[in-house]
């Protein structure tokens, strides 16, 4: 009798476990992530950031261009810093790097990133599953720190992305979409530069 | 007795002129372009749906936000496969896409959102530096993976991607790359790759 009860318990437990496993597998029946060994860095030059043109007021008469545009402006973007060249790296090893020259000694800069992180095998109230976290915007280095431009007008700094994400430093792992990257002028909080190219 | 040379009116006039010049210079003041910005290189992470209303309570691993969403791919593609992909936009206007681990075959499109600022553009208000409304363009060339799932140095041009606005790809343009995405042309052009890293 006891043996039968024990078998029944084991069977039920086994079935539950199987169900749990299946449900977990269903949870994972999602797109596969890229191969972490073959996915490397984001390595971009940065161009000057200008205000977005949302309500064009100019009629463009040149051919091969959009028919309307805005006068260039730097109201929500920075127009106080000079910059000859700037580069941004988001490295696979979790380091962020900023390299630039042509700034003025004493200028204070930060990187601002907007990230969407998805991780497999996260323990939740609904079991273990792949989770996408709410988009997070982080400043590197964190306030009140900043990268100060040297006497020669250059900046060459790096930081661990985990330090910028603290206390949620666990977000430094997984599938990390970089939705936005900006170089900030710390003194006015405005965007100086953003990834891009100077076509010429 | 009037002093010869500078009069009060002259001084006031001069100061007004300087003030107006200053205001005019201020009105024209704009951040200059950088001297160099040679290339944009981005490996791609897998695109996932945004988590706007977290429904899960997260307990482990440590140092994660306390809540999140189940990973979903409703507004993003869930059909494509991608081992890795890299997009390289050069200052010359050449775009190179490399990748591996795609389906055989898999048809891929490149989409970019660009903010272009350009000097000496002819307008109804005369030549001036302008910023165009953000342009989201899909390059017309469909990239098809090889039988082994690879994409070898598929070369596109910025001019072809800009289509009717191809004039922005020549001359001097400050081009902010606001967004880059790989689209699954076999699945309604849904996004499956965005700049990112996998760790």
Image (spheres, rainbow, N blue to C red):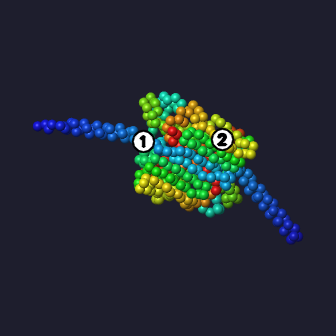
From the viewer's side, name the closer residue of B185 and A28: B185
Q: Residues within 10 Å of mark 2 (few under 14, many from 20)?
A: some
Q: Which mark is residue B154?
A: 2
Q: Residue at x 57, y 50 (%)?
A: A43
Quadrant where the N terminus of chain B sits is top left
Q: Residue furthest left?
A: B1
Residue A26 seen from this side: yes
Total marks in image: 2
Q: CA distance from mark 1 to mark 2?
A: 37 Å
Residue A120, compared with residue A60, is above or below; it is below
Residue sitting nearer the eye, B1 or A83: A83
Q: Residue at x 42, y 45 (%)?
A: A79
> Does residue A76 appear left or right of residue A121 in this picture?
left
Which chain letter matches label 1? B
Give residue B36's position: percent from left, percent from top: 49, 45
Classify mark 1: helix, strand or loop: loop
User: For the C terminus of chain B, which image quadrant?
Assistant: bottom right
Q: Name the residue carrying label 1.
A: B30
Disc nearest the viewer among 1 and 2: 2
Instruction: Compare marks 1 and 2 and give the one earlier in the sequence.
Output: 1
Chain of the residue under label 2: B
Mark 1 in CB contact with mark 2 (< 8 angstroms): no
Q: Is residue B47 visible?
A: no
Where is residue A189 shown, x and y percent of the image? Answer: 45, 51
The reply to the same-chain question for discs 1 and 2 is: yes
Front-lying residue, A6 or A68 = A68
At 59% from the left edge and 47% from the top edge, which residue is drawn?
A: B41
Q: Residues within 10 Å of mark 1 (few under 14, many from 20)?
A: some
Name the element at disc 2: strand
Q: Quadrant of residue B144?
A: top right
């Amino acid at each position: 009798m006891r043996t039968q009860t024990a078998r029944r318990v084991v069977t039920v437990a086994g079935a539950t476990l199987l169900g749990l496993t299946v449900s977990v597998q269903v949870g994972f029946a999602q797109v596969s992530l890229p191969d972490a060994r073959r996915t490397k860095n984001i390595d971009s030059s940065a161009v000057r950031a200008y205000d977005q043109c949302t309500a064009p007021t100019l009629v463009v008469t040149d051919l091969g261009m959009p028919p309307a545009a805005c006068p260039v402006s730097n109201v929500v973007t920075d127009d106080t810093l000079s910059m000859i060249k700037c580069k941004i790296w988001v490295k696979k090893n979790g380091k962020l790097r900023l390299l630039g020259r042509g700034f003025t000694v004493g200028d204070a800069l930060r990187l601002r990133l907007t990230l969407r992180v998805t991780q497999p095998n996260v323990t939740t109230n609904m079991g273990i599953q792949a989770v996408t976290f709410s988009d997070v915007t982080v400043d590197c280095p964190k306030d009140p720190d900043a990268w100060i431009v040297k006497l020669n007008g250059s900046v060459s700094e790096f930081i661990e992305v985990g330090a910028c994400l603290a206390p949620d430093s666990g977000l430094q792992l997984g599938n990390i979409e970089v939705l936005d990257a900006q170089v900030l002028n710390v003194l006015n909080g405005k965007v100086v530069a953003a990834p891009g190219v100077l076509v010429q | 007795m009037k002093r010869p040379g500078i009069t009060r009116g002259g001084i006031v006039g001069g100061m007004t002129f300087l003030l107006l010049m200053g205001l005019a210079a201020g009105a024209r003041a704009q951040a200059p372009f950088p001297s160099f910005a040679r290339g944009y290189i981005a490996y791609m992470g897998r695109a996932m749906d945004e988590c706007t209303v977290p429904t899960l309570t997260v307990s482990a691993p440590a140092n994660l936000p306390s809540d999140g969403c189940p990973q979903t791919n409703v507004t993003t593609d869930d059909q494509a496969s991608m081992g890795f992909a890299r997009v390289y936009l050069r200052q010359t206007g050449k775009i190179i896409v490399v990748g591996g681990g795609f389906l055989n075959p898999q048809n891929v499109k490149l989409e970019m959102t660009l903010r272009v600022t350009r000097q000496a553009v002819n307008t109804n208000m005369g030549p001036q530096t302008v910023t165009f409304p953000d342009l989201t363009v899909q390059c017309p060339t469909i990239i098809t993976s090889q039988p082994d799932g690879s994409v070898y140095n598929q070369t596109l041009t910025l001019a072809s991607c800009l289509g009717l606005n191809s004039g922005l790809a020549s001359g001097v343009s400050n081009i902010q790359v606001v967004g880059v995405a790989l689209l699954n042309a076999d699945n309604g052009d849904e996004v499956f790759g965005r700049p990112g890293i996998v760790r």
